Amino acid sequence: STALFKMAGVESEALGARERMSLKLHSNNVTCAAFWLEEDVVCSGSMDGTLMLWRVHDGWTHRLRAHTGWVTCCAFQPFGATLVSGSADETLRLWHLSALLAADDSGETNVNERANGSNGSNGSGSKRSVSIELKSYGGCVKCCCFSPSGALVCSGSADNF
């Protein structure tokens, strides 16, 4: 499950937290989570091979499918509507989220092709460019992040190089 905690004492010496809410959105273990501050959205990745977007203030959710292995890492671009994810399927993907948020429809987006420039299909069957594969590694992608400016993506994999 994915849990949110309300922090207490962040600005003081005494740290503490209280669980605010929890969602069970995945069919397997959650392996990573990231917070998108601009949109109040949490993304969680799972061993079920999916990413779940969850807008905290109204409960909107949307599932992203493209990885064929479990999702190992995810990160939001500091400025903009882009998510990066890595997987045990040895791929690093970029997700363009502005169209999903504008449509404001809960549901699921499936990416039908794994090649660069692949298109996503929302639940209604209409196509929109949602995700692209950035790189295919020779091993599991272990970590990914954006630079503070959002202009660079960094990733690490278990490809022995």
Image (cartoon, helix red, strand yellow):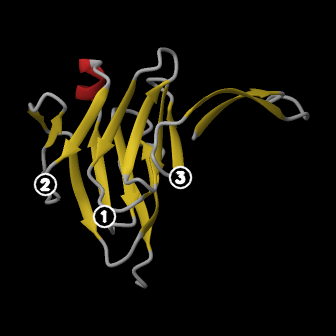
Where is residue 120, by image quadrant? top left
| Residue depicted at 15% across the width and 38% down the height | 121
Separation of residues labelled 1 and 2 (CA atoms)? 13 Å
Question: How many residues crowd mark 3 within 10 Å: few (<14), some (14–19), many (20+)?
Answer: some
Question: How many residues crowd mark 1 within 10 Å: few (<14), some (14–19), many (20+)?
Answer: many
The first of marks 1 and 2 along the sequence is: 1
Q: Are marks 2 and 3 in contact (CB under 8 Å)?
A: no
| Residue depicted at 32% across the width and 23% down the height | 106
Residue 140's place in the image compared with 92, above or below, is: below
Nearest the camera: 41 or 105?
105
Where is residue 102, by image quadrant? top left
Q: Residue lying farthest top? A: 58
Residue 79's place in the image compared with 38, above or below, is: below
* Residue type marked 2: Glu
Q: Position of residue 110 (x, y in %)?
A: 21, 43
Q: Position of residue 160 (x, y in %)?
A: 43, 85
Residue 18's place in the image compared with 146, above or below, is: above
Q: Quadrant of the N terminus?
A: top right
* Residue type marked 3: Asn
Relative side of 36 to 151, left or right: right
Q: Quadrant of the C terminus?
A: bottom left
Is residue 145 at all visible to an observer of this figure? Answer: no
Q: Mark 1 = which residue?
A: 91
Is residue 70 at all visible to an observer of this figure? Answer: yes
